[in-house]
Amino acid sequence: MKKRQHLGVLGLGFVEFQIIFLLSIWLAFPQQAAGLRPIREKARTWSDEWLFGRKQVSEGGRFSAWNITGTYRGNWKFLDSLNSSSKFQDFQKSNGNSVVELVAVPTKITGVHYVQGVVLFHDVFDNEQNLGGAQISLEGVYIWPFRQLRLVANSGKESDAGQDENNLLSNPYHLLGIFSSQVFQESTRDRILQRKISPRNEMDKHCNIEIAAQISRVASSDNNGDKSYYHMEGLMESPGVGDDGDCFSPLFLNATSVNVEVYYNKAVNYTLMVTFVSFLQVLLLIRQMEHGNTQSGAAKVSIVMIGHQAIMDAYLCLLHLTAGILVESLFNAFATAAFFKFVVFSIFEMRYLLAIWKATRPSISGEGWETMRRELSFLYSRFYGILLGGILIMYELHNYMRPILLLMYSFWIPQIVTNVIRDSRKPLHPYYIVGMTATRLAIPLYVFGCPHNFMRIVPSKAWCVCLCTFMGLQAVILLLQHYFGSRCFVPRQMLPEKYNYHRRFNQDISRNTDCVICMTAINLRQRTSDFMVTPCEHFFHTGCLQRWMDIKMECPTCRRSLPPA
């Protein structure tokens, strides 16, 4: 009986094994494809495609299914010296830069991937409007056993290209490039104008685009910022619709893929730099607030200078937060940088702004709560009005962004002017002057000076030198005012009259010669530089009255207001 049960179990296991074996053969056999487009259970984001690519990159082998999804940077040029077609005379430049965005997904046919793409040509058209870019949406197949890529675009037919393009260009490399170009290079108005008057509208109606390219793997190079995995090299042709002839001469394309992981690291390192700079600025602000923690010390600081820096930090907070929202995969990094910028301007700079405002209005505390609330409301309305107005001005004058940046980085000038007008003594700590100048330069020098910055901004050494010189000159003037006097560089003939605390006095009149600050006697027969006499005819030691005026600008004896020393 046990033997039969044992044989029955063996027979059942053999039958199960046969069923599983047949199923595995049936599943492994290539199925008949209904078409090239893949069946998607859900909409795949760019992050999903990147993870898919990371999974298959490690699969070696001569005939492994390379996933070519990603961004390719390269150049284009006509095979002839110039465009020989007469249909589009504006297509006159012989070469330029190009960016190719591809998304490849597997199909039911073994060895074939369905590919959607966008080719962005720079420096193409030479027309009156100087709008040199063109963008063409493509689709096709990638036959990975032969490393062949075939893409076509018939822009004249109606399609849902807009939806495909939105999905395609969710690539963080492309999104951050668009964001930085919108902020630092070209305006939205120019992009709308480009779509309306670009010769590409005529190409949409009369041209087909065909690209035949070969994909090869290239070794990664560490000598530049972007490592590469694949290289695309091929020919782009444009047969006309019907018998119209070619739209333009064949042109040669070659591009190399960008390693997005390295690009991610660049963006994260940038946000770490911004976070560290913001932390240093908090420490410098604390040091400055301790330096001028008295009413007299706070009143020497220009409220326009602090408000100017607070508005700059508010703009940086908004920019980093917008970039984090735009690129979801980098939200945490950019949100952290935005948070620290928010802390700098909303807590420390606004607090210092209120302290300066209160110090310059000592009598307002005695006028009642209603008066103080009205004045505070007026202060906040001016601050946020200037903040919003600046956004509108930068939008309207977007083509003049670099001069606007120079204007924004002139925040030391109000303090220099205030020092000259009030003849203030040491209003700012030297560490604050040098530290703020250096930390404020960090972001623009990275954006416009780093040759491999993640924003893909073309570096400009001349502009960086100009900005550093401009900021350095302001810092040097402030340091000279700190050590040699606020009016040291102003000619004496141009200076207004100033009260002399070491003036001569009538020695025949009897006076109380005791210093009420230190409660010691004053020898009036000594040099006049050893003691000071106020406009109300009260005498004090020089050092005692100077330390007193650092706290209060009023006479210690009669409480009368004192002029600057």
Image (cartoon, helix red, strand yellow):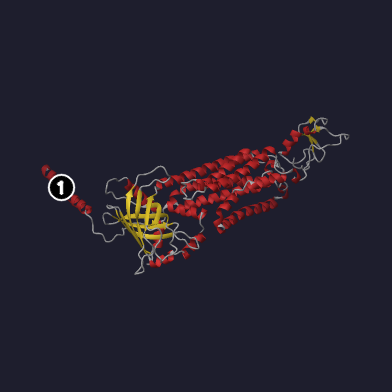
Residue 333: x %, y % from top left:
47, 46
User: Which quarter of the rendering shows the C terminus?
Assistant: top right
The residue that appears at 67% across and 37% down in the rendered structure is 483
Identity, as a three-letter code, of the amino acid under mark 1 = Phe
> In the displayed structure, does residue 243 sit left or right of residue 358?
left
Mark 1 neighbour class, 10 Å CA radius: few under 14, some 14 to 19, many 20 or more = few
Q: Is residue 302 visible?
A: no
Residue 105: x %, y % from top left:
33, 55
User: Which quarter of the rendering shows the N terminus?
Assistant: top left
| Residue closest to the far right | 508
Q: Where on the picture, by quarter, is residue 140? A: bottom left
The residue nearer to you, when weighing 168 against 349, is: 168
| Residue closest to the far front | 81
Residue 343: x %, y % from top left:
56, 45
Q: Secondary structure at mark 1?
A: helix
Q: Where on the picture, by quarter, is residue 248? A: bottom left
Q: Is residue 487 visible?
A: yes
The residue that appears at 70% across and 45% down in the rendered structure is 420
> In the displayed structure, does residue 369 sit left or right of residue 60?
right
The residue nearer to you, when weighing 402 against 542, is: 402
Residue 171: x %, y % from top left:
41, 53
From the image, tell me which residue sits under label 1.
14
